[in-house]
Image (spheres, helix red, strand yellow):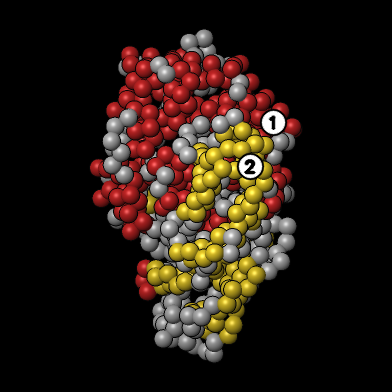
Amino acid sequence: MYNFFESNSIKPKGWLLKQLEIQANGLSGNLDKVWPDIRDSAWIGGEKEGWERVPYWLDGFIPLAFLLENEDMIGRAEKYINAILDRQQEDGWICPCKPEQRGRYDVWAHFLIGKVLAVYCDFTHSIRAQEALYSSMKCLYSLMKSGDIKLFEWGEYRWFECMIPLQFLYEIYREEWLKELGALVREQGADYTKLTELWKRPLNKWTLDTHIVNLCMMLKYEAVSCWLLGGDYTDAAESLWEVLESYNGTAVGTFTGDECLSGLNNNQGTELCSVVELMYTCELMYAITGKNIWADRLEKLAFNALPAAMSDDMWTHQYDQQVNQIACVKLPGRSIFRTNNGEAHLFGLEPHFGCCTANHNQGWPKLTLSSYIKSDKGITCAVMLPSVLETTLNGVKVTVSCETEYPFRNRGVYTVETNGEVSFELKIRIPKWAKEVTVDGDTFANSGYVTVNKNWNGRQTVTVELTAEPELVSRPYGMYAVEYGSLVFSLPVKYRKQMHEYEQGGVERKFPYCDYELYPETEWRFGFADTAFEVVEKQGDEIPFSSQKPRLALKARFAPIEWDFADGFETVADKAPLSEKALGAAEEKEMIPYGCAKLRITETVIIE
């Protein structure tokens, strides 16, 4: 699909394999057993939700199952796909609603199940699924051309998602009606270039125009449209990103949005759905445009915001994460979040709302599939991940594997093996933050890539080492965050967990898929006493982003400062301290990766 290698050609190794195994053993791999909206969905003949939740779940569960070669999970995925296809109507309509309800059924779910079937076909080469996708899109084309169906609400704001399954089909069939449907969808879809003024002043108001997940999906609209329909690519995504980041950006590469855009305060929330959708956008944007900035953005999201929002065992997750998060405790009275309730930052089964419960699991599998990208001249190693690619170039079997602990160590060993002589270009993308690059012992300035263009034969290695230094990055309100390589670091706050098992609305929360509040047990009011940091490499444990034994730390000196709670709250830090003066002696503390720190101070001041 796209400019990616066939999905079955890539497999995880090392810490990435372990991360996917944890996900499979957690909520993502068991959601069909414990959650009614998946287990009893209308998509498979049940009476529960028949819109986005099953497609959301399958969009991550299918690649997870096949990447792990887990026969039980593959069988369960096939069971769901077959149940959906068994219920497809004669004219191709695939969504679970009666014919008379089609005009009121938001076709965002139609786009989404189209993406799922494309992913499934890429792994399985299923002719049945391919034909079902074809007939479903042909049905949608007929209904939209006749005017019986028009885009509204989510379908109107997520119109570009339809381009992905349409492109998949066009590469197979080359039929013009596929482009015509793409044009119809684009014509009826929202024009985000006219909405940017709304993103500059956050409101305590829910709107589709400022919905964070819509916006994180939206950034790829021009690329996927040009991909299918042609036309000049103007790089509109960059100007749109600039507005979103300038007025709503965070220290970890996300945008605030507890459903809707929330400004620059570091105590505001970012919805987990927006994290994984923004990752997918970056993956597609890099594959289509080849611009390194999208892979840089992807790394920051994947190695910071994604693991931060999940418990170590991946049985629970947050709906909203905060950059400065000193407690995850139910908020009394009004919420700090602009459009979400006071439980959205708890770790649980479906805090606030269930979309993230179903959708969060696409993050790690799709990142794995993006580790290698197909180029005109050969193979591009897009993200340094422990993984292996097996493909064929000019009739010769080629295997590229990467041994690495990145992002915890800034070194990777790429091994290329061929069963004959073949000429191709191996490009290894270098993140922008790298000061220097050492390749097989020779050091160079960072030019964005290490490129090896040669005749390959047998087994050869390329060792890449990246030079990084801890850096203080300026943030709003006179605050600073610390970055080292692709990781953002936080001062962790120790906590005690309070478990809640209960049933609500027919949905049971029971260990391990129950809810948790995190109560702080150590002080959090500190500022940087100086700007020196010492990198400490650690053994860690079997959990890659472990909250208990992180694999990397920064030693830094901190001093206590005057810092109040946000107005009206006792468990939310104000956006900035009251003073930059120390209230006591400085002491050495360890900062850990943001993704490991469930309670944390990430942004603070430099003490005068």
Q: CA distance from mark 2 to mark 1?
A: 36 Å
x and y percentages locating residue 106 in the rendered image: 42, 28
| Left or right of residue 560: residue 578 | left
Badge 2 amino acid: Asn
Residue sitting at 40 percent across and 63 percent down? 265
- Label 1 crowd bin: few (<14), some (14–19), many (20+), radius 10 Å: some
x and y percentages locating residue 289 in the rendered image: 39, 42
Callout 1: SS: helix
Q: Is residue 370 above or below residue 301?
A: above
Residue sitting at 53 percent across and 45 percent down? 454
Mark carried by residue 457: 2
- Look at mark 1 in the image and give the residue it sits on: 74
Q: Choose between 305 and 436: the one closer to the eye.
A: 436
Residue sitting at 42 percent across and 39 percent down? 288
Asked whether disc 2 touches disc 1, contact meaning CB atoms under 8 Å apart, the reply is no
Badge 1 amino acid: Ile
Residue sitting at 36 percent across and 71 percent down? 477
Q: Choose between 449 and 575: the one closer to the eye.
A: 449
Mark carried by residue 62: none
**In terms of image quadrants, where is residue 365?**
top right
